[in-house]
Amino acid sequence: MNAPHAPAPNELATPDLFTFDNSYARELDDYCVRWSPAPASRPVLLQLNRELAAELGADPQALAAPDGVAALAGNRVPAGAEPVAQAYAGHQFGGFSPQLGDGRALLLGEVVDRNGRRRDIAFKGSGRTPFSRNGDGKCALGPALREYLIGEAMHALGIPTTRALAVVATGDMVRRDRALPGAVLTRVAASHIRVGTFEYFAAHHGPERVKRLADYTIARHYPQLAASATPYLDLLAAVAERQAELVARWLGVGFIHGVMNTDNMTLSGETIDYGPCAFMETYSPHTVFSSIDSAGRYAYGKQAGIARWNLARLAETLLPLIDADSPRAVTLATEVIDAFPERHAAHWLRVFRAKLGLDEQADAAVDQALIDDFLLLIKGLRLDFTQSFRALYDARLADAADQLPARLLALAGDAVRSDDDGADLVAWSARWQARQPQCAPALLAAMRLANPCYIARNHQVEAALDAAVEHNDLAPFERLLEVLRAPFDARPADAAYGEPATREFTTCYQTFCGT
């Protein structure tokens, strides 16, 4: 696979911007294709994540200097980098695509950060690769800024995620439904190994190549499994555990990924790809925003089931490694997949107990019923998910649980249909108070971190992106980014950022893939 590639002018090295140690290109050189990013005509640095740069051991000032911007635009390859396009396949909306790969992305290299973690540094929008099919390999400015913004919001919420290091405007236009300004996003990830990576090598090259990939994944992400007698079965279980927790944490903040294809599920357990994602406002398990998800496959309430389905696809690639006896391998893998709902339910209960300020002393069924009944109440009243749960925290913080029904009824406004709604809220509030009469400081602290004031609300994201793309005004983007990086403490000056969109906006709102 690693076809020779003649050096291009942009492969002239810049000074040392990062200390690279490129294990994927070194150990799996035939799992990728060496390639060069396409140069930008007039690169301009629009965003630089200085805190992340320092974490990676880089000098933010050097990255913002001309040589650094040239490197972040793809015009110069940093010293020590070995750019490669990675191969992967994927089930997209249930249908298998045997070859996808980095069609508009490029793994620049890896660094070991200041905390000892190995991190990928990769481009999105850096031009065509051998995997581009009919695409141009470019990225429009709006999707690049969107990924930067949502990744930082998720990081601030404490949810495992890829993050953006930089956005550079290329000075070139890209053609979508119309001409749009182009950009290159620099993305940082624990790795870009996906379920779809395993699917590609299982489909095209067989068990030996899958074994090499699995051994690399274990060494990089699950070193504790290296001495296991059943490392590949344990790898499946470990990935399932991380995904069970990740999706539970998504649900706790109302996050809808929007395109949970197998090529968008990482083995590291990080959230990846923020194309058609969105945050739910009015609570409903059926909420979908993605324009390409017409059947609701990836709706808010279906995400755990889809994670299980994706893990089953991973399991299929590992079967020859799990056991030489095929029926026994299927039995062992099926046990892991069938255990996923229980794993996820335990994480979900932990997340939502924290949102209600509950300890773990009561029977799980009691707390499950309390949580479910609250969700039914706010669904019936068409209440905003984030505001409703924040109201619980505010009531606990003020030691005024008896005032909660009035607060929620005020949020409901015209949605209150009868006196029964108020009575139901009063009854539920009494149950909640009885379940946890005293909220210890540790519980209150956990409750705060489970109930943000500020999420990346869809109308605010769109307004910020519109200002940047249509009016060359980054001020709204930067202001929203500032708010989302501190999501847990209410600030009077930021009150507008805690308000949901109008119902008219949300009813018509759609997100798009960004490709």
Image (cartoon, grey):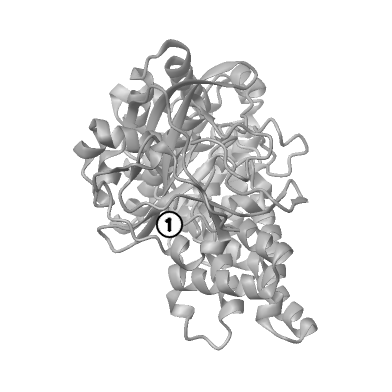
Q: Nearer the viewer, residue 236 or 54?
A: 54
Question: Residue 96, percent across and down?
Answer: 76, 52
Q: Please tell me how many numbered marks the rendered image carries.
A: 1
Would you call the spot at circle 1 few (<14 residues within 10 Å), some (14-19), or many (20 or more)?
A: many
Q: Is residue 419 left or right of residue 18?
A: right
Q: Nearer the viewer, residue 5 or 380?
A: 5
Q: Amino acid at mark 1?
A: Ala
The residue at 72%/63% (across/down) is: 204
Q: Quadrant of residue 335?
A: bottom right
Q: Is residue 90 left or right of residue 34?
A: right
Q: Looking at the picture, does residue 345 appear above or below residue 102? A: below
Q: Is residue 367 left or right of residue 18?
A: right
Q: Is residue 460 visible?
A: yes
Pick the quarter of the image with the N terminus.
Answer: bottom right
Question: Residue 311, percent across and down?
Answer: 66, 63
What element does badge 1 sit on?
A: loop
Residue corresponding to mark 1? 190
